[in-house]
């Protein structure tokens, strides 16, 4: 491991501190190791430039260059910059040397090198910049990222200082606000302090901090109805369908409450929206497409730039196949029970008269089984034709035309179709509407 030149602690830095490194006394200062860095008592903490020693010369050269860049030195405020050589397969002696080099900061690993590890004045690690943040950024861009995180640390420390002087729920609110400062981590004992200050979780920060997305999703998948409800459903003809629908409604009610709870962050609420969409897709049918769209819209609005926000439009496209006049019917557009499904799109129904709605089979293993067709003007039903119909091959087609008598002009035509296909829905066909 490299031995670093000794720093003369007189307020003036020795140019030979590191090979090719010179730090301006007008900005952040540099040190060879933690012992020397801590002697400077930096108010803004430490910036450790970690590079691959002996197995990647590029990362070392970049760190040496960045440590003397004026923009980065200015952005670092009253911090001390120090290097950290990371060996690929260190010997026991080299590992001990690195521990001594890092002192109370401890040896922190990064996902990739070069990396900039950021520590507060007390030695708490609060942020890491690595990968594209370091390699692809210009010094000015990197300086802006350092400045942003340092500013976040100052804001967080201010809240933590205020929390020390507070008690109860007010203390919890300050601790929670400190934990939510974006771009940096928070002290490890924050949750413990929150629970002590707010045992009833009136602030909501405890449940927010304890939330684990994937654990929660797994728990949702295991949810079922209570024993009393299950007994009431036992033996009913549509027991499975009712159980499925009631479980879905129970889960959505829970998720809606969490989405409305101000204790959760927008990112957490996006997870609840995603869970709601998954529940509807797993337990619902085409008649729940509107709800999927509602949750997807909410998920996008919470943070359009996040991964879940960006995925909202793709979810809608993939999971909300609609029954339309232009595309006809297909398996994904048919409900699992006898719930009416709306025919979406512009309908050629305006003037008074009799309109024939005809279902014509095209392909598939099963015929389309229809029970009735309803016509509404907005929310008001104005015509209905209810009779058993089947649209299949030549042997399985009967009563596949439904006639609707309209007595006056229709302002907002809406057509609802009730099918009777609880399980076998492998059917494709077209729908036509003609005025007789």
Image (spheres, helix red, strand yellow):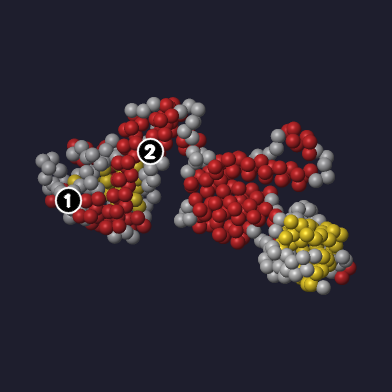
Q: Nearer the viewer, residue 55 or 287?
A: 287
Q: CA distance from mark 2 to mark 1?
A: 32 Å
Q: Is residue 83 above or below residue 192?
A: below
Q: For the residues carrying marks 2 and 1, which lies nearer the camera in this image? A: 2
Picture quarter containing residue 124? top left
Mark 2 falls on what kind of element? helix
Residue 331 image position (x, y, % from top left): 73, 61
Question: Is residue 15 toward the left or the right of residue 379 in the image?
Answer: left
Question: Is residue 379 toward the left or the right of residue 67 in the image?
Answer: right
Residue 179 image position (x, y, % from top left): 40, 39
Question: Is residue 350 toward the left or the right of residue 123 in the image?
Answer: right
Q: Is residue 259 above or below residue 171?
A: below
Q: Is residue 79 above or below residue 70?
A: above
Mark 1 falls on what kind of element? loop
**Residue at image coords 24%, 48%:** 76
**Residue at image coords 62%, 53%:** 292
The answer to whether the residue labelled 2 contacts the one labelled 1, judged by CB atoms less than 8 Å apart, is no
Q: Nearer the viewer, residue 427 or 106?
A: 427
Q: Nearer the viewer, residue 220 or 388?
A: 388
Residue 227 image position (x, y, % from top left): 73, 33
Checking the image for residue 23, the label placed there is 1
Residue 426 image position (x, y, % from top left): 76, 62
Residue wearing tag 2: 178
Picture quarter containing residue 432? bottom right
**Residue at image coords 69%, 42%:** 247
**Residue at image coords 78%, 72%:** 434
Q: Is residue 428 visible?
A: no
Instruction: Please tell me which of labels 2 and 1 falls first in the chain.
Output: 1
Q: Bin the neighbour count of mark 1 within 10 Å (Cα to Cα): few under 14, some 14-19, many 20 and up.
A: many
Q: Is residue 212 visible?
A: yes
């Amino acid at each position: 491991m490299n031995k670093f030149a000794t720093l003369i602690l007189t307020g003036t830095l020795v140019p030979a501190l590191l090979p090719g490194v010179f730090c301006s006394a007008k900005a952040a200062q540099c040190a060879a190791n933690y012992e020397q860095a801590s002697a400077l008592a930096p108010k803004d903490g430490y910036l450790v430039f970690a590079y691959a020693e002996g197995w990647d010369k590029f990362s070392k050269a970049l760190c040496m260059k960045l440590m003397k860049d004026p923009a980065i030195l200015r952005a670092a405020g009253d911090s001390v910059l120090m290097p950290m050589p990371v060996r690929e397969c260190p010997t026991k002696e080299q590992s001990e040397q690195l521990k001594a080099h890092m002192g109370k900061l401890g040896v922190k690993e990064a996902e990739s090198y070069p990396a900039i590890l950021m520590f507060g004045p007390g030695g708490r690690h609060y942020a890491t910049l690595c990968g594209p943040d370091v390699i692809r950024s210009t010094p000015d861009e990197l300086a802006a990222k350092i400045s942003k995180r340092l500013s976040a640390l100052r804001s967080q420390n201010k809240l933590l200082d205020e929390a020390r002087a507070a008690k109860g729920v007010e203390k919890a609110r300050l601790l929670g606000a400190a934990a939510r400062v974006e771009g940096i981590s928070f002290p490890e004992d924050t949750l413990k302090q929150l629970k002590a200050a707010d045992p009833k979780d009136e602030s909501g920060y405890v449940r927010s901090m304890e939330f684990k997305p994937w654990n929660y999703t797994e728990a949702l998948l295991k949810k079922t109805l209570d024993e009393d409800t299950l007994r009431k459903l036992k033996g009913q003809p549509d027991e499975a369908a009712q159980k499925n629908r009631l479980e879905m409604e129970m889960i959505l009610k829970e998720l809606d409450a969490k989405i409305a709870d101000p204790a959760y962050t927008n990112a957490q609420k996006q997870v609840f929206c995603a869970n709601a969409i998954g529940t509807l897709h797993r337990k619902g049918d085409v008649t729940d497409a509107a709800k999927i769209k509602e949750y997807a819209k909410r998920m996008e609005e919470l943070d359009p730039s996040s991964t879940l926000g960006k995925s909202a439009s793709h979810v809608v496209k993939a999971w909300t196949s609609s029954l339309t006049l232009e595309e006809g019917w297909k398996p994904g557009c048919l409900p699992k029970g006898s719930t009416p499904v709306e025919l979406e799109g512009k309908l050629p129904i305006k003037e008074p008269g009799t309109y024939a709605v005809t279902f014509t089979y095209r392909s598939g293993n099963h015929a389309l089984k229809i029970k009735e067709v309803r016509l509404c003007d907005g929310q008001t039903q104005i015509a209905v034709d209810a009779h058993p119909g089947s649209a299949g091959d030549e042997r399985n087609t009967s009563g596949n035309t439904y006639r609707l008598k309209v007595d006056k002009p229709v302002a907002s035509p809406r057509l609802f179709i009730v099918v009777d296909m609880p399980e076998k829905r492998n059917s494709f066909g077209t729908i036509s509407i003609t005025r007789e």
